[in-house]
Amino acid sequence: MRVLMKATMDTEKANEVIRSGKMPELLQETLDMLKPEAAYFGAIGGRRTALLFLDMQDSSEMPRNGEPFFSQLNAEVEVYPIMNLDDLHRGLSRLR
């Protein structure tokens, strides 16, 4: 299932990781592990946020997927099921 994982980082903890020089390595290791379809980063609600689009085979993957953000950045992690246009078309065709 395709999901959007939104990780909103704790500002103080992210500042600490940035000052230590470890943020690029942490993000690269996390992206290498998760293999997202797409990854975007920005300030949402005034806080550093990562938006990752992932294919999750099973809900049991959620702890592993969120853990780098929880343990390293004190992030708030949210996971939403999402669809691309092809998924939406398939879903709508089942309504008939």
Image: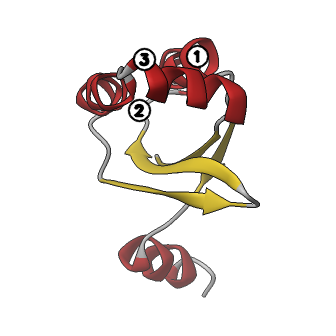
Q: Which residue is mark 3?
A: 20
Is residue 19 in sight in this rendering? yes
> Mark 1 or mark 3, which has the lower sequence index?
3
Q: Which residue is mark 2?
A: 57
Indicate the secondary structure of the residue bearing disc 3: helix
Q: Which residue is mark 1?
A: 63
Residue 44 occupies quadrant: bottom right
The quadrant of the rendering that contains the C terminus is: bottom right
Identify the residue at horizontal 61%, vertical 59% (top origin): 43
Indicate the secondary structure of the residue bearing disc 1: helix
In depth, the one of 32 and 11 nearer the eye is 11
* Mark 1, other Cα within 10 Å: few <14 / some 14–19 / many ≥20: few
Indicate the secondary structure of the residue bearing disc 2: loop
> Horizontal and vertical percent for residue 26?
36, 22
Q: Looking at the image, which residue sits at the far front? A: 19
> Horizontal and vertical percent for residue 68?
49, 18
